[in-house]
Image: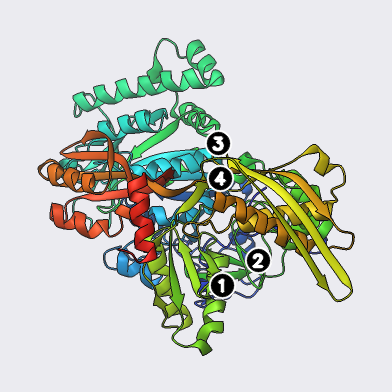
C-alpha cells in the first residue's frame, strides 16, 4: 500500500476513499506559513519549478503523465551533503533563483529555526519541481541517528532514492542504517559520491566501501576528472564524453560536454573505454535481455553499442535492485548535479513501475514546495501531495471511507500477531500500515512554568507525538510528573526548543536519564487471591502463575496457559489476564524500568461468578509483581554501536578515554589519513561525549552512535547504579 501519495480522481467517478496519510513533510509547521493559493482552472507562469516564461495549464502542472513522475528521497550519513545537494537541484531546476547554503541558514528544505541554527536536517521536507519534462517529487531526509524514524516513514512510500556519500569517508555508520531501511522497503537507488573536491577525497576508496560494506554492486557511470583540489569535472562513461564546469561561473550552470578524442585525451579515452567495457559486461551479467543483445549483435565491438540500449538495461537492473549506478561530483562547488538529475529521471522508476493500484479522493489537496504550498483540485496516481484538516490522524495511519474498508485493508496488510477480536478497535483507530518505531533510550522529566500551563503542555506534547511517534510521553505514577522519552540528547533538546518556539511555553527539563530495562534470572511461582465486595456483588479471584527467563529477546512477556485453565477461560477473562501481566511488566522491582525477556505460564485461575474483568486484571498483576520480587533480578542497559573517526595523532587519547567508559573496541580501520574506531559502549557512559571528544582532538574528530541491543550489567556496576538511585552514594 502506498503511503504519502494521494491518488485522486473526479468526485463523480468514485465514492470510496482509500488514503494513506503520512505526516512526513512538516505539514503542521508548514501550513502556518501557507503563502500560495491558486484558483482552480487558472493558467499561470510563475509557479516554482517552471523554467522560463512557459505558460502551462493547471492540469499539466498537477497531472503530468505518470511515466514522467519521479518520487525520490535523498538519504545519507550526517554531513555527507544531502541538503546542499538538494539546494543545487532546486536551483538548476529553476525552483529557486539563488543558491542557499546550510552554513548561512537560508536553505529551502531546512526552514525550521532549529535546523538553520544547527546546520542539520531534523524533519523531512518535500519539494516538487520539474526537470526536462519530468515531474520530480523530492524529499530531503535527516542524517542524524536521533531522527531515523523520519527516514523510515519517507522511504517506505517513495519509488526511488539517492544515497549521498562523502567521497573522503565512503560508507559511514548512518549510511548503513538508511541503506538497510531502503533494502527493507525494496527501494531502487543510485549513489552520488559528493565532496570530490574535499581533501582526502578518493573515488576508488568510496566505490570499494560501497562494494564491501553495503554488499552492493556499483555500476560506474562516471569517472572523476581529478580529485580533491584538482577536481574539475566528470567523465560520462556511457556516452564517452567529458563534462567540464566553467571556472568563471559562480553558480555552476555553465558546463561543457565534449566527446573524448584520441587526439586531445588519449589517456582519459583509454580509461573510459575500459570502464565502459567493464560496465557493459557487468550489466550483461545481471540482465539476460541485454546479454543476448551484447553477445549477438555487438560481441565483436562494444563501441558500436548505442548508449540508449545500455541506459535502458541499467534502468532495468536498477529497478531489479541487483546493482546501483554510481555518479560523482561536488554539490558545494556546483559540479555534477545536473547529470545527477538526468540520472534520476533516466534510471529511477516511475510510480507506474512500482505497481501501486489504489485510487483515492479527498476534499482539499496541496502541492508541497518546502514551506509553501499550492492548493489544487485533484491529483492523479503517482503524485505526492499534502492534505489538511485531519485532526485525529498520526504518522502511518491509513484513512478509509468505512470500517469494512479498514478491515479489508488490515487483512491486506497482514499485521503480525494481530488478533481477530481486536480488528474492530484497529478499524476505529485506523492504525493499519504503521511504521516501525524504535524504542526510546533517554528520558527526563518535563514541567510547565506553572500548574495552570499543564493543559497547554499536554496539548503541545500530544501534537508533537502525532508528528513524531518516536517521542514517547508518560506519567510517573509515583510523582505524577510528565516523563519525556526520546531517541537521544539532541532529540529531546529539539523537542524542548520546539515547545518554546511553536507553542510559547517555557518548560523545565529534569536531568537526562538512561532508559534501563530489567529481567529475571530464575524460575519462580506465586499465588494471590483477591476477595472484595462492592455493593451487592462479590468479586473473588485466585491466581497461580510461574515466571521464568526467556532465552530469546522479547520486549513483551510471552504468555502461556496450562491446559486446565484454557478449558473454561472466556475471551474477556483471557484479555483481563494478559492486561494484568502486561501492566505488572511495565515497572520492574529494581528501578521501575520495563521488564523484558520473561515467559509467564498461568497454572490456575479460579473466578467467582460475577467477578469483573477489572478485578481479574488487578489480581493477576499483583500476583505477577510478587513473582518478580521473589526472583533473582538483573538490570539491562542499552549498548550502543560507536564509530569514531579521528586523525592518527589523536588516536591514543581517544582509545584511553573509551576504556574508561567501559568501551569494547572491535576493530580500528584506516580511512585515508584518519583512523576509524568501531566498537560498543554503554549509553550511560557516553552522555556528553561530543564535548569531551572535541576537547581531546581539538575538534577534529567525529562520532556516530546507534542502539545495538540491551545487555546485562555486571554485578559491580549494577550495585553502584542501585546505590546511586537509592541515594546511598
- Could you tell me which residue is drawn at 30 percent across and 53 percent down? 685
Name the residue carrying label 1. 463
Quadrant (top left, top right, bottom left, bottom right) of the C terminus: bottom left
Mark 3 and mark 1: span between their CA atoms? 36 Å
Identify the secondary structure beneath mark 2: loop
How many residues crowd around disc 1 within 10 Å: few (fewer than 14), some, or many (20 or more)? some
Identify the secondary structure beneath mark 1: helix
Q: Which mark is residue 552?
A: 3
Q: Nearer the viewer's eye, disc 4 or disc 3?
A: 3
Name the residue carrying label 2. 393
Instruction: Please report contact status of discs 1 and 2: CB closer than 8 Å, yes or no.
Output: no
Instruction: Please report contact status of discs 4 and 3: CB closer than 8 Å, yes or no.
Output: no
Mark 2 and mark 3: span between their CA atoms? 35 Å
User: Tag 2 or tag 1, which sits nearer the N-term?
Assistant: 2
How many residues crowd around disc 2 within 10 Å: few (fewer than 14), some, or many (20 or more)? some
How many residues crowd around disc 3 within 10 Å: few (fewer than 14), some, or many (20 or more)? few
User: Tag 1 or tag 3, which sits nearer the N-term?
Assistant: 1
Q: Position of residue 166 (x, y in %)?
A: 29, 44
Q: Position of residue 377 (x, y in %)?
A: 68, 68
Q: Nearer the viewer's eye, disc 3 or disc 1?
A: 3
Amino acid at each position: 500500500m502506498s503511503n504519502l501519495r494521494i491518488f485522486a480522481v473526479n468526485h463523480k467517478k468514485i465514492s470510496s476513499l482509500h488514503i494513506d496519510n503520512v505526516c512526513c513533510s512538516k505539514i503542521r509547521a508548514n501550513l502556518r506559513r501557507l503563502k500560495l493559493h491558486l484558483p482552480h482552472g487558472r493558467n499561470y507562469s510563475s509557479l516554482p519549478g517552471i523554467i522560463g516564461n512557459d505558460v502551462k495549464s493547471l492540469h499539466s502542472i498537477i497531472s503530468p503523465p505518470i511515466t514522467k513522475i519521479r518520487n525520490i528521497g535523498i538519504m545519507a550519513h550526517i554531513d555527507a551533503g544531502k541538503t546542499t545537494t538538494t539546494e543545487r537541484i532546486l536551483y538548476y531546476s529553476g525552483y529557486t533563483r539563488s543558491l542557499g547554503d546550510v552554513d548561512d541558514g537560508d536553505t529551502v528544505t531546512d526552514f525550521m529555526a532549529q535546523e538553520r541554527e544547527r546546520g542539520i536536517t531534523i524533519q523531512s521536507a518535500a519539494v516538487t519541481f520539474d526537470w526536462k519534462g519530468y515531474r520530480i517529487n523530492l524529499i530531503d531526509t535527516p542524517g542524524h541517528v536521533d531522527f531515523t524514524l523520519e527516514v523510515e516513514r519517507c522511504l517506505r512510500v517513495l519509488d526511488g532514492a539517492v544515497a549521498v556519500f562523502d567521497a573522503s569517508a565512503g560508507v559511514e555508520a548512518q549510511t548503513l542504517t538508511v541503506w538497510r531501511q531502503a533494502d527493507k522497503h525494496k527501494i531502487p537507488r543510485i549513489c552520488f559520491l559528493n565532496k570530490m573536491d574535499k581533501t582526502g577525497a578518493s573515488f576508488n576508496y568510496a566505490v570499494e566501501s560501497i562494494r564491501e560494506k553495503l554488499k552492493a554492486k556499483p555500476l560506474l557511470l562516471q569517472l572523476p576528472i581529478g580529485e580533491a583540489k584538482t577536481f574539475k569535472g566528470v567523465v560520462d562513461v556511457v556516452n564517452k564524453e567529458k563534462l567540464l564546469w566553467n571556472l568563471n561561473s559562480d553558480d555552476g550552470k555553465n558546463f561543457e560536454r565534449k566527446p573524448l578524442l584520441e587526439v586531445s585525451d588519449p589517456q582519459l579515452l583509454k580509461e573510459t573505454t575500459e570502464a565502459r567495457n567493464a560496465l557493459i559486461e557487468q550489466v550483461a551479467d545481471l540482465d539476460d535481455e541485454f546479454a543476448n543483445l551484447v553477445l549477438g549483435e555487438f560481441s565483436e565491438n562494444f563501441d558500436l553499442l548505442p548508449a540508449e540500449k545500455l541506459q535502458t538495461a541499467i534502468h532495468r537492473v536498477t529497478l531489479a535492485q541487483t546493482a546501483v549506478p554510481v555518479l560523482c561530483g561536488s554539490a558545494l562547488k556546483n559540479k555534477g548535479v545536473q547529470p545527477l538529475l538526468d540520472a534520476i529521471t533516466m534510471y529511477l522508476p516511475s510510480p507506474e513501475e512500482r505497481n501501486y493500484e489504489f485510487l483515492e479522493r479527498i476534499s482539499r489537496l496541496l502541492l508541497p514546495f518546502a514551506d509553501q504550498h499550492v492548493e489544487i483540485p485533484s491529483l492523479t496516481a503517482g503524485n505526492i501531495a499534502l492534505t489538511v484538516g485531519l485532526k485525529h490522524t498520526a504518522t502511518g495511519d491509513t484513512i478509509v471511507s468505512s470500517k469494512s474498508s479498514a478491515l479489508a485493508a488490515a487483512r491486506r496488510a497482514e499485521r503480525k500477531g494481530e488478533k481477530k477480536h481486536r480488528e474492530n478497535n484497529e478499524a476505529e483507530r485506523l492504525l493499519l500500515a504503521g511504521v516501525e518505531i524504535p524504542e526510546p533510550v533517554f528520558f527526563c522529566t518535563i514541567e510547565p512554568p506553572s500548574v495552570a500551563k499543564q493543559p497547554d503542555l499536554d496539548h503541545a506534547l500530544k501534537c508533537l507525538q502525532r508528528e513524531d511517534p518516536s517521542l514517547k510521553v508518560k506519567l510517573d505514577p509515583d510523582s505524577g510528573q510528565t516523563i519525556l522519552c526520546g531517541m537521544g540528547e539532541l532529540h529531546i533538546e529539539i523537542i524542548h526548543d520546539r515547545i518554546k518556539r511553536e507553542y510559547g511555553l517555557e518548560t523545565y527539563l529534569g536531568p537526562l536519564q538512561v532508559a534501563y530495562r530489567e529481567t529475571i534470572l530464575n524460575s519462580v511461582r506465586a499465588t494471590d487471591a483477591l476477595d472484595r465486595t462492592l455493593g451487592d456483588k462479590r468479586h473473588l479471584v485466585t491466581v497461580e502463575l510461574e515466571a521464568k527467563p526467556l532465552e530469546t529477546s522479547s520486549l513483551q512477556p510471552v504468555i502461556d496457559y496450562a491446559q486446565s485453565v484454557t478449558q473454561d477461560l472466556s475471551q474477556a477473562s483471557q484479555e483481563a489476564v494478559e492486561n494484568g501481566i502486561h501492566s505488572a511488566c511495565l515497572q520492574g522491582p529494581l528501578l521501575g524500568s520495563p521488564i523484558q525477556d520473561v515467559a509467564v505460564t498461568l497454572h490456575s485461575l479460579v473466578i467467582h461468578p460475577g467477578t469483573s474483568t477489572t478485578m481479574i486484571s488487578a489480581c493477576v498483576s499483583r500476583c505477577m509483581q510478587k513473582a518478580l520480587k521473589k526472583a533473582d533480578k538483573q538490570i539491562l542497559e542499552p549498548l550502543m554501536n560507536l564509530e569514531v573517526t579521528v586523525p592518527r595523532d589523536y588516536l591514543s587519547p581517544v582509545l584511553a578515554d573509551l576504556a574508561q567508559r567501559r568501551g569494547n573496541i572491535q576493530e580500528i580501520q584506516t580511512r585515508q589519513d584518519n583512523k576509524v574506531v568501531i566498537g560498543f559502549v554503554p549509553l550511560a557512559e557516553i552522555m556528553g561525549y561530543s564535548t569531551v571528544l572535541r576537547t581531546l582532538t581539538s575538534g577534529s574528530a567525529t562520532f556516530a552512535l546507534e542502539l545495538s541491543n540491551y545487555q546485562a550489567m555486571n554485578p559491580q556496576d549494577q550495585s553502584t547504579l542501585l546505590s546511586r538511585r537509592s541515594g546511598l552514594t
